């Protein structure tokens, strides 16, 4: 296997980009997300919500999106806040 300096440089730059992006997303979450695993869980939850909402009529989609996102996205958080803080 041949590894060139360019390939290593590109991989390192991509890794740093991913670290910077995840750090920014965690900081912008307002304390809801405590780490990278929580970030992955929230993003995955929002992806599943988007797929399910495509099955609903557009009127319901617009009315329920924010409520469903707020309730369902944090289900799998590793460092989840207490239930009463999530609903606020």
Image (cartoon, rainbow, N blue to C red):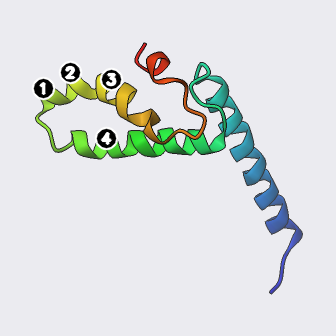
Q: Is residue 67 above or below residue 74?
A: above
The reply to whether the C-beta atoms of the residues labelled 3 and 2 are less than 8 Å apart is: no
The kind of secondary structure element at disc 4 is: helix
Residue 9 at x, y = what percent? Answer: 84, 60
Q: Could you say which is closer to the camera, residue 20 or residue 30?
A: 30
Residue at (56, 25) in percent of width and height = 32
Q: Answer few, some or many: residues within 10 Å of disc 1's Cα (few below 14, many 20 plus, some between 14 and 19).
A: few
Q: Quadrant of the C terminus?
A: top left
Label drawn at residue 59: 1
Residue designated by label 4: 50
Q: CA distance from mark 2 to mark 1?
A: 7 Å
Residue designated by label 3: 66
The kind of secondary structure element at disc 3 is: helix
Q: Quadrant of the N terminus?
A: bottom right
Q: Residue furthest right?
A: 5
Q: Which mark is in front, 3 or 1?
A: 3
* Label located before the other in sequence (2 or 4): 4
- Residue 27, by quadrant, is top right
The reply to whether the C-beta atoms of the residues labelled 4 and 1 are less than 8 Å apart is: no
Label drawn at residue 20: none
Residue designated by label 2: 63
Q: CA distance from mark 2 to mark 4?
A: 13 Å
Residue at (14, 38) in percent of width and height = 56
- Residue 7, by quadrant, is bottom right
In the image: residue 38, left or right of residue 65: right
Q: CA distance from mark 4 to mark 1?
A: 14 Å
Q: Could you say which is closer to the camera, residue 10 or residue 66?
A: 66
């Amino acid at each position: 296997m041949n590894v060139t300096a360019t390939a290593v440089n590109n991989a390192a730059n991509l890794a740093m980009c991913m670290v910077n992006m995840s750090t920014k997303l965690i900081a912008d979450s307002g304390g809801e997300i405590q780490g990278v695993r929580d970030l992955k869980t929230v993003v995955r939850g929002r992806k599943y919500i988007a797929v399910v909402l495509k099955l609903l009529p557009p009127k319901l989609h617009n009315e329920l999106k924010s409520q469903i996102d707020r309730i369902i996205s944090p289900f799998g958080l590793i460092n989840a806040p207490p239930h009463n803080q999530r609903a606020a």
